[in-house]
Image: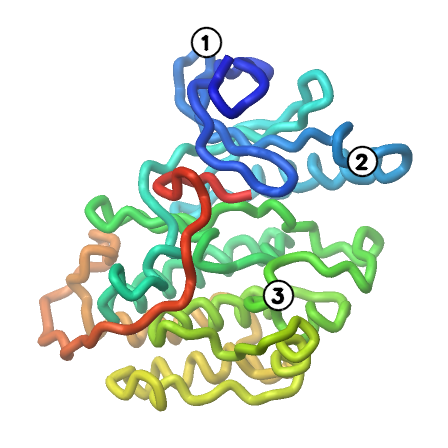
Amino acid sequence: MVPGFERDRLGPYQIERLLGRGAMGAVVLGHDTDTRAKAAIKTLSLSHEFSGDDLNEARQRFFREADAARRLHHPDIVVVYDAGEDDGVAYIAMEYIAGHDLQRHTHVSQWLPLPAIVHIGRRVAHALAHAHSQGVVHRDIKPANVMIDLAAGVVKVTDFGIARITDACRTRTGMLLGTPSYMSPEQLSGQLVDGRADLYSLGVMLFQLLTGVLPHRAESMATLMHAIVNDVVPDVRTLRPEVPPALAQALARALAKPPGARYADGLQLAQALDAVAALWPDHPLTPPDEAAPAVATPGVDAFASTVKLSRPEPGHNSGL
C-alpha cells in the first residue's frame, strides 16, 4: 500500500506515491501498467463525500470536467489522458509535470523577475483563449494552478477541476466555486460567468506576482467580497513603479469590475501581454519560434510576498 493513500491501483494505473492531498481528494503519481507512461492522477472518493441525488450530480460533474478538459489541446495546458471510477473512487489521469507551481513565487525569498512574470502571463492568457474557444471556463485561475519549469521553458495551466461547459442549462446561479481572493465580481455575486471571469483572475494573479500582495485584502470574508465587487483596484505602479505603462494598462483593464469593460476574450489580453513581452524577446520562457534579436532588459527589483505553501510536495501538479 502506498503511504498516505488507501490503495495501490486505480483502473490501469499502478500508484507509486502520494503527491498531494486536499479537502476532497488526493493527487498521486502512477504509471500505466501497459505503456509504463507516468501520470498525475487526481482522485475524489465520491461515495464518501456525497449521497443520493448529490452523489449522482457530483459524479456527472466530475466526468463533465474530464470530458471538457480532454477537449483542450494546447502546449500550455496540462494534457488529460482519461478518467474513470474504480470501486467508488473517481479519478482523472493527466500529464505529470515535474516542475512547481507559482505559489512559491509569491513568497519573499523566491520572487520572479518582471520579464518572467510577463512571459508567464502571456502564455497563460493564450492557454485561456484556447479553452474559452472550446467553451470551457477554468473558474479557479490562481498561482497554485499554474505550473512552471523555468529551465525547460515550461508553463502549464492545470486543474480545470471546477471548469464547466458554459452551457446555461448546466449552470446554476448562486454556486460559489473557486478561490475567493482571485474570483471576479460577477462570480462572487453568483451570476453566470464566461471567459472574462478567468481574465479577471489572471489579472489578480499577475498583480500579486508583481507586487507581493493581492489587489484586495480584508480581515473578513464579507469585507473581502464587498471590496472585490465594489472597490477599484489600485494602479500596480503605486506598488511597483518600474512596471511598464502598457502592462499597468493591461492589468487595469483585466481587473475592471464590469465584465464588459474588460478584454472581450483571452486572445485580446494575450495580444496585449505579447506586446509587453516583446521588451524581452529572448527570455527563456519565449518559445523558440518566437525568439528575436535581444534588446536591453530594464532593471528589475525584488518584491514581497504573503502566501505560504501548504501542500506536502508542491513541486508537481498536485493541486486539487
Percent of width and height locating residue 5? 54, 23
Dot 3 amino acid type:
Pro
Q: CA distance from mark 1 to mark 2?
A: 33 Å
Q: Earlier in the sequence, mark 1 or mark 3?
A: 1
In this image, 117 relative to 279: left or right?
right
Q: Badges 1 and 2: C-beta atoms under 8 Å apart? A: no
Given residues 43 and 186, the one toward you in this image is 43
Q: Residue at x 40, y 20 (%)?
A: 37
Q: Earlier in the sequence, mark 1 or mark 2?
A: 1
Q: Residue at x 74, y 31 (%)?
A: 46
The residue that label 3 is drawn on is: 180
Could you say which disc has been placed on residue 115 in the image? none
Dot 1 amino acid type:
Asp
The residue that label 2 is drawn on is: 50
The residue that label 1 is drawn on is: 34
* Mark closer to the observer (1, 3): 3
